[in-house]
């Protein structure tokens, strides 16, 4: 809930899946006051990730800031009951280029059907697009991941920039739902530039175990989201030393 003196407030949201309302929260700074100024990171001042703790019901949205109160908000309705993790990803003004990710848990009342025993999956399909994940996550070292987008078996080469890259990847660890920062490789795309079918990322899993990966990509102005479930193996001592030559 807090890092470097910044604190995520309690999240106000509808209490059940039947209610429509507003999701709202504030970030307070080291002086205890609401933060009202932010830097842009990946073309937005605030990235809000919402996902149920079984890895389903993923959403990546961008709330609006009320600069007079420091409150972030957006219209909201839960699709299903359950326990959700809320991740606020942002960069305060004056704190360099580093972004912070703060998290809270929200319980949503209603009839719950948990999703269990989800199999590993390196392929997903959404809106007629097929996406394949290549690469292995290895605990304690950086891993190259490549996602390839096809449609009806043909490579898609019309990927558009989205949030400053040709794709945006979020990784969460099963169990405690730890949020991992994943970075797109290559130069930032220019306005109007297109690419594909491959999108490359660099990711580092802190421990062995199962991870949920969510890819957002944009074609013809529409954002699509695919999900993958992968297992990170334990790295060798040599791999860890290569990733951290100073031993840290």
Image (cartoon, rainbow, N blue to C red):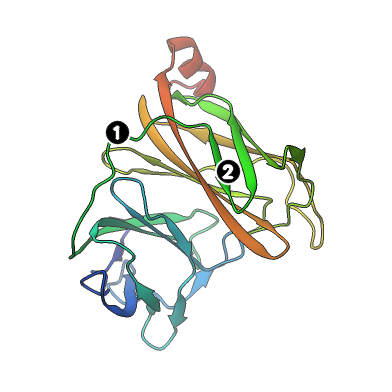
Whether residue 83 is visible here, answered yes or no, is yes
Q: Secondary structure at mark 2?
A: strand
* Residue 198: quarter of image: top right
What residue sits 30% from the left and 71% below the top?
Answer: 31
| Crowdedness near tag 1: few (<14), some (14–19) or many (≥20) residues, C-alpha within 10 Å | few
Nearer the observer: mark 2 or 1; the answer is 1
What residue sits 77% from the left and 40% below the top?
Answer: 155
Query: Which quarter of the rendering shows the C terminus?
Result: top left
Could you tell whether 31 is left or right of 200 in the image?
A: left
* Residue 70: quarter of image: bottom left
- Using the image as rendered, state which of residue 79 and residue 238 is in the foreground: 79
Check the image and report above or below for 217 versus 199.
below
| Crowdedness near tag 2: few (<14), some (14–19) or many (≥20) residues, C-alpha within 10 Å | some
Q: Secondary structure at mark 1?
A: loop
Q: Where is residue 98? Give x, y as percent.
A: 50, 53
Q: Where is residue 35? Give x, y as percent.
A: 39, 74
Could you tell whether 246 is left or right of 14 in the image?
A: right
Q: Which residue is mark 2?
A: 183
Q: Which residue is mark 1?
A: 117
- Using the image as rendered, state which of residue 147 and residue 152 is in the foreground: 152
What residue sits 52% from the left and 68% below the top?
Answer: 45
Q: Where is residue 235? Give x, y as percent.
A: 43, 16
């Amino acid at each position: 809930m807090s890092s470097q003196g910044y604190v995520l407030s309690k999240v106000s949201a509808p209490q059940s899946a039947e209610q429509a309302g507003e999701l709202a929260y504030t970030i307070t700074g080291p002086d205890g006051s609401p933060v009202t100024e932010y830097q842009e990171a990946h073309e937005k001042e605030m990235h809000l990730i919402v996902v149920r703790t079984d890895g389903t019901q993923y959403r990546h949205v961008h709330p609006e800031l009320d600069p007079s109160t420091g409150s972030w908000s957006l219209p909201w309705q839960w699709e299903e009951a359950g326990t959700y993790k809320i991740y606020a990803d942002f960069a305060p003004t004056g704190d360099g280029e580093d972004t912070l990710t703060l998290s809270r848990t929200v319980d949503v009342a209603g009839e719950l059907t948990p999703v269990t025993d989800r199999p590993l999956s390196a392929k997903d399909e959404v809106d007629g697009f097929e996406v394949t994940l290549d690469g292995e996550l290895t605990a304690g070292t950086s891993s190259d991941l490549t996602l390839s987008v096809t449609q009806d078996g043909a490579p898609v080469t019309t990927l558009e920039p989205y949030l400053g890259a040709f794709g945006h990847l979020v990784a969460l660890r099963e169990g405690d739902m730890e949020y991992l920062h994943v970075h797109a490789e290559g130069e930032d795309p220019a306005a109007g530039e297109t690419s594909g079918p491959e999108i490359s990322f660099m990711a580092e899993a802190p421990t062995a175990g199962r991870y949920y990966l969510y890819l957002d990509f944009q074609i013809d102005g529409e954002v699509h989201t695919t999900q993958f479930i992968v297992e990170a193996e334990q790295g060798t001592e040599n791999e860890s030393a290569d990733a951290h030559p100073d031993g840290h």
